[in-house]
Image (cartoon, rainbow, N blue to C red):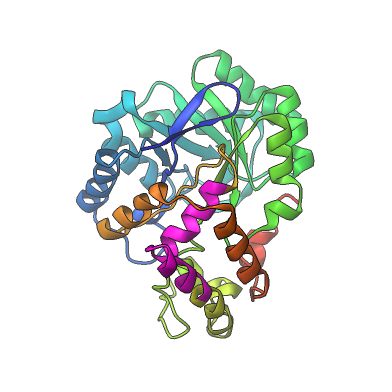
């Protein structure tokens, strides 16, 4: 597996990581624990060294799964987790909480659940408008000095916030949604800020929550327990309109002997050498399909063809439901 370096501190990860969230949360019916561990082991065996989770996934149960699954490979993998949501004792959420005392509490919990003595990459899950980012950066800096955290990053942060945070405690990575149907970070200067400051970028949902694989159509039934059921972009009408984008990807991918999912991932990998997407899946054949994208080299002509084709197709629907969009740092 090709390796990529995130940030200036030497954080080295596989070019494609693995988003663990969907193994037992968010996408409806979860895998049972044994199958979830088996999927993570399969990813390791195929060269993946970069695994992404968060305390709020569940909450807590995803970190526990990841901790158990990766314990035998601890020295060979990079585990990223996140803090920043307020979580009540009963597991319900109460918005955002990045007060230093909560950051410290979250990190201690994550260390325990992940069965590690140091978190490789710690993200602020969402920017807390009530806590200055400088205060958050200082709190994480103390955790780094204490040896509890190696590197840190931000998720769904604006370019201005990235700059302010980086000035206090250098960032290794920024994580935001980015794919051929979600390109906000190209327009809002987030990618430019990462390039200027030498920060790695980690696209989450690089396959459009499964839509860019072609496996989802306008008629696909989405269970009410699946977060996509509340996302405007996954309404029946939006999916019907957005199939035009998938059709274009299928056509171009066929010319490369690839699937639309592989083309979408190869496109991201070709954007910058410091970009490392984290697709997730619960299916072994999809994992293997995704990983083959690393071997697909897109030429300048290929990239121009993709750009020309997708630029003609406006994407319908917001990428997140309104409450989630309200937590994005613009």
Viewer-nearest residue: 83 or 184:
184
Residue 252 horizontal/vertical position (percent): 49, 69
Residue segment shown in magenta: 248-270
Viewer-nearest residue: 66 or 219:
219
Query: Predominant secondary structure in magenta?
Result: helix
Left or right of 163 on screen, residue 66: left
User: Is 195 in the magenta?
Assistant: no
Asked whether the viewer can see residue 299, the reply is yes
Q: Is residue 228 above or below residue 109?
A: below
Q: Count the marks: how many? A: 0
Residue 295 horizontal/vertical position (percent): 39, 47
Left or right of 124 on screen, residue 250: left
Left or right of 77 on screen, residue 324: right
The residue that appears at 77% across and 32% down in the rendered structure is 164
Viewer-nearest residue: 64 or 258:
258
Q: Is residue 172 above or below residue 329?
A: above
In the picture, residue 99 is in which quadrant?
top right
Q: Is residue 282 above or below residue 13?
A: below
Viewer-nearest residue: 302 or 133:
302
Residue 172 horizontal/vertical position (percent): 59, 30
In the picture, residue 97 is in which quadrant?
top right
Q: Is residue 103 above or below residue 284?
A: above
Asked whether the viewer can see residue 24, the reply is no
User: Is 255 in the magenta?
Assistant: yes
- Which corner quadrant holds the N terminus? top left
Residue 127 horizontal/vertical position (percent): 68, 43
The residue that appears at 73% across and 38% down in the rendered structure is 193
The residue that appears at 32% across and 66% down in the rendered structure is 29
């Amino acid at each position: 597996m090709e390796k990529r370096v995130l940030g200036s501190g030497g954080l080295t990860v596989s070019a494609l990581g693995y988003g663990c969230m969907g193994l037992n949360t968010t996408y409806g019916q979860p895998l049972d624990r044994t199958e979830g561990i088996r999927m993570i082991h399969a990813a390791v065996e195929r060269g993946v060294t970069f695994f992404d989770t968060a305390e709020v996934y569940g909450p807590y149960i995803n970190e526990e799964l990841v901790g158990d699954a990766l314990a035998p490979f601890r020295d060979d993998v990079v585990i990223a987790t996140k803090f920043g949501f307020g979580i009540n004792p009963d597991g319900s959420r109460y918005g955002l909480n990045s007060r230093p005392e909560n950051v410290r509490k979250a990190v201690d919990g994550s260390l325990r659940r992940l069965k590690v003595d140091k978190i490789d990459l710690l993200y602020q899950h969402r920017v807390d408008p009530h806590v200055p980012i400088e205060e958050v950066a200082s709190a994480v800096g103390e955790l780094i000095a204490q040896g509890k955290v190696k590197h840190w990053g931000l998720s769904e942060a604006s370019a201005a916030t990235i700059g302010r945070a980086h000035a206090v405690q250098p960032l290794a990575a920024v994580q935001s949604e980015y794919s051929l149907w979600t390109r906000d970070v190209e327009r809002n200067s987030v990618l430019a800020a990462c390039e200027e400051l030498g920060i790695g970028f980690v696209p989450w949902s690089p396959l459009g929550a499964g839509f860019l694989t072609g496996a989802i159509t306008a008629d696909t039934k989405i269970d009410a327990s699946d977060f996509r059921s509340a996302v405007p972009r996954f309404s029946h009408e939006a999916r019907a309109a957005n199939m035009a984008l998938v059709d274009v990807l299928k056509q171009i991918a066929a010319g490369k002997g690839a699937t639309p999912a592989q083309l979408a991932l190869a496109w991201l990998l070709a954007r910058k050498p410091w970009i490392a997407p984290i697709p997730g899946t619960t299916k072994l054949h999809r994992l293997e399909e995704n990983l083959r994208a690393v071997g697909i080299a897109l030429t300048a002509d290929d990239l121009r063809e993709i750009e020309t084709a997708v630029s003609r197709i406006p994407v319908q629907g917001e990428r997140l439901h309104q409450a989630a969009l309200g937590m994005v740092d613009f």
